[in-house]
Amino acid sequence: MKKVYNFNAGPAALPKEVLQKAQSELLNYQETGLSVMELSHRSPHYEQIQHNATELLKKLMNIPENYEVLYMQGGASLQFSAVPLNFLPSDQTANYCLTGSWSEKALKEAKRVGNTHIAATSKEQNYTHIPNSLNLSDNPAYLHITSNNTIFGTQWKSTPSIPSSIPLIADMSSDILSKQIRIEDYSLIYAGAQKNLGPSGVTVVIIKKDLLEQCSTNLPTMLNYQTYAKNNSLYNTPPTFSIYMLSLVLDWVEKQGGITKIEQINGEKANTLYHVIDSSNGFYHGPARKDSRSYMNVTFTLPTEELTTTFLQQAKEHGFVGLAGHRLIGGCRASIYNAVPIEDCKELAKFMEQFRTNFM
């Protein structure tokens, strides 16, 4: 099989060891004679899978006891609605930081529910950086951020500083587990799995128990976070195979040396590619401001559309997959989530340097 370098933005690369483990157990999980996909979600074997995933996540992320870990479906997009439905009373205002398309979509859903306010935005600068200051509304219900912006290639480098009385809610779909964070700074974190956690299908929610008590009671059952907390995320059939894969990915992260080691490697991967961009004398241009650059999604452009097309064609011929930029902005993008090996980033850097030499 031809070597493929997977830089897809999501669904994204999975660790080879994880795929091999899943392959070996696919037809017969722990001598049950059944695939994981066939196990009852009420069976002891599946309950152990979900328990292992939760305990590993708590260990790796240092999640305190006063937080719940929930497993939901619908991706981050459903969370855009669930958050305001649960935590936006009619007499308060939801505050949003606009740093890209996904934060715009989150705000759009909140507007359907109640009062909203833009606390910070970089939209006028085409989302090339993370805003430096916040302007919170009166009586804020919460502040919502998108920690990493896959389309524009920017990332929050530090946690926003707000009063502890205001819940901080974060969409971490594209950089969860990629670096160390202090869980206590957040009241709710949610993340679709298909970047760093596993395949698509499950959304991980980490929520402070104090915030859980504030959930609206006048909601459809499956949109209320308390439904999941009270039923160990087993009110209905959860995405069992996705949670099984999540448990394997978390085990892989632990074997790599945990988030500390993962963060170090991610920095090396990103800097390898940014060095090629910065030393190209303008042949490659990184639109994201240097102090806001993402370590998950490296975005760049070439001098002309024609050169961009040629670059992407030749990259594909050399086995590089997923380098086209998002359809909204074009250009190029290398998504270098946890499972992308540093060797693949070095190969891409070599290809970029050779391409520049051939066309300058």
Image (spheres, rainbow, N blue to C red):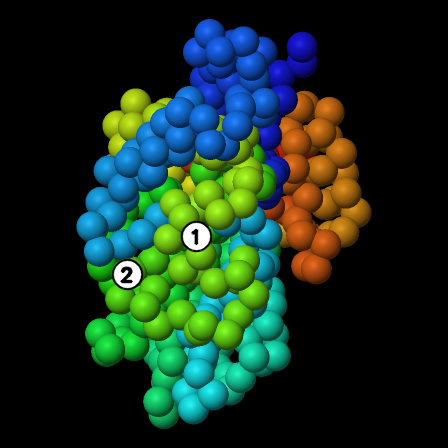
Q: Is residue 221 left or right of residue 211?
A: right
Q: Position of residue 131 (x, y in %)?
A: 41, 73
Total tally of numbered discs in the picture? 2
Q: Residue 228 — which label?
A: 1
Classify mark 1: residues with Cα within 10 Å, few (<14), some (14-19) or many (20+): many
Secondary structure beneath label 2: helix
Quadrant where the C terminus sits is: top right
Quarter containing the N terminus: top right
Q: Position of residue 188 (x, y in %)?
A: 36, 61
| Amino acid at circle 1 | Tyr
Front residue of 14/303: it is: 14
Q: Is residue 157 above or below residue 198?
A: below
Q: Is residue 105 visible?
A: yes
* Percent of width and height locating residue 231: 41, 48
Pointer 2 residue: 209
Q: Say if 194 sits above or below 301 in the image.
A: above
Q: Which quarter of the figure has residue 44?
A: top left
Q: Is 335 left or right of 179, judged from the image as shown?
A: right
Q: Indicate the amino acid at tag 2.
A: Lys
Pick whichever, 72 or 34, lies toward us.
34
Residue at 22% across, 45% down: 62
Q: Nearer the viewer, residue 234 or 64?
A: 234
Going 56% across and 65% down the picture, which residue do you hit?
A: 220
Helix, strand, or loop for circle 1? helix
Please tell me whether residue 338 is drawn above or below residue 89 in the rendered image.
Answer: above
3D distance between C-alphas at marks 2 and 1: 12 Å
